[in-house]
Image (cartoon, rainbow, N blue to C red):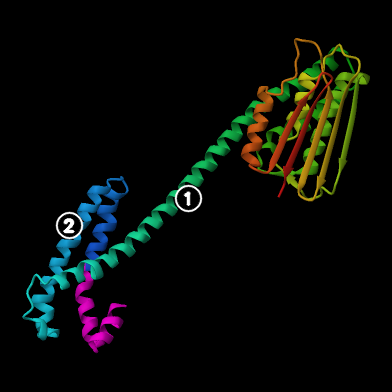
């Protein structure tokens, strides 16, 4: 660019090209010293005063070096009319500092800072993803023992009663364990498959409570091909059976409505409430706190969760944007 601009001004491109060629090593030296010494040693460590002073001294020193090369070498060959100009020529020195050198420093520093910023952004994203993955794994690990405890209690009750339903329950448990151990490690699973696992869990609970339990399960909307994060819906149903019912109650009920409209998944769970003081609804229990956290991690700003606790029922209203 300097060759084109100054060459047209001086009316000779070849001579200006030689001048730029002679100045190139000095400019490269300033650029490399700034990029690989001053920036890492001072600027990246936020030693701004030291960086500014060191850069200024380097630029000033290089300006004098370039002035010396011009006076002792270039001027006698290409600019004989300027040979008699003094060495400490203010205009020439300022031209070297603010035009020849600073332009190179500003451009190369800009590229280096942008590259550093981009690298830091990539690194931060990787760290955030690793942290989220570790946290989600921890939350899944907390869900597994709780789920197994409830399900094994069901099988234990059947074995005590010597029920013929026990083998079928074991098969359903095997299917659910496969879901917990393998599908839960995936980022997304088929929504229909997740609902089928939910229904399997309800069947296990129906065996446990028998005719005392009234289950209403409704599903609507075209869910074919849609996906959802695993272990989102099941903990809410699990919480209803853990805290909402009591073995001594004769009339216990739970209604589950799942609807998909456009990209929004609506899930409403309402269950009868156990009134015995030793078993109270746990809207802020560990299990629901975990699922709240999972929703925040997996569907940030794309979900809403409301819980209503009345004297006779407990209700969960969940909305998720599956886009």
Considering the numbered disc 2 on the image, is that residue within a helix, a strand or a loop?
helix
Indicate the position of residue 269 as horizontal and vertical percent values. Answer: 81, 31
Q: For the magenta stretch, what is the residue range?
A: 1-26
Residue at x 19% of width, y 75% of height: 22
Q: Position of residue 189 (x, y in %)?
A: 72, 43
Residue 122 disc label: 1
Q: Give the label, 2 or 1, closer to the camera.
A: 2
Which sits in the foreground, 264 or 215? 264
77 vs 319: above or below: below
On the image, the x and y values in percent for residue 78 come to: 14, 85
**Is 3 in the magenta?**
yes
Magenta part, dominant SS: helix
Mark 2–mark 1 Cα distance, whole angstroms, equals: 34 Å
Instruction: State the residue position of label 2.
Output: 57
Q: Residue furthest front?
A: 90
Can you see residue 230? no
Q: Residue at x 71, y 33 (%)?
A: 180
User: Quick check: 1 above or below 307?
Assistant: below
């Amino acid at each position: 660019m300097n060759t084109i601009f100054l060459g047209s001004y001086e009316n000779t491109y070849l001579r200006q090209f030689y001048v730029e060629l002679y100045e190139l090593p000095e400019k490269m030296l300033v650029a490399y010293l700034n990029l690989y010494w001053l920036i890492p040693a001072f600027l990246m460590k936020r030693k701004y005063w030291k960086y500014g002073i060191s850069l200024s001294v380097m630029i000033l020193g290089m300006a004098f070096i370039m002035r010396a090369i011009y006076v002792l070498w270039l001027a006698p060959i290409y600019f004989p009319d300027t040979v008699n100009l003094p060495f400490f020529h203010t205009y020439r020195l300022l031209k070297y500092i603010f035009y020849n050198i600073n332009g190179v420093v500003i451009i190369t520093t800009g590229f280096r800072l942008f590259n550093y910023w981009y690298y830091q952004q990539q690194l931060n994203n990787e760290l955030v993803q690793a942290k989220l993955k570790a946290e989600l794994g921890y939350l899944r690990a907390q869900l597994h023992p709780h789920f197994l405890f409830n399900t094994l209690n069901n099988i234990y009750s059947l074995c005590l009663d010597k029920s013929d339903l026990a083998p079928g329950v074991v098969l359903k448990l095997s299917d659910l364990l496969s879901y917990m151990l393998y599908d839960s490690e995936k980022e997304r699973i088929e929504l229909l498959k997740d609902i089928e696992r939910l229904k399997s869990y309800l069947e296990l609970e129906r065996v446990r409570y028998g005719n005392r339990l009234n289950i209403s399960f409704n599903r609507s909307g075209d869910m074919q091909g849609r996906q959802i994060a695993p272990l989102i819906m099941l903990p809410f149903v699990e919480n209803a059976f853990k805290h909402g019912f009591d073995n001594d109650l004769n009339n216990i009920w739970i209604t589950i409505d799942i609807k998909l409209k456009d990209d929004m998944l609506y899930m409403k769970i309402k269950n009868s409430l156990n009134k015995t003081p030793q078993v109270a609804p746990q809207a802020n229990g560990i299990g629901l706190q975990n699922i709240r956290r999972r929703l925040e991690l997996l569907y940030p700003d794309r979900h809403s969760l409301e819980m209503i606790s009345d004297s006779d029922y407990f209700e969960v209203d969940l909305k998720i944007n599956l886009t």
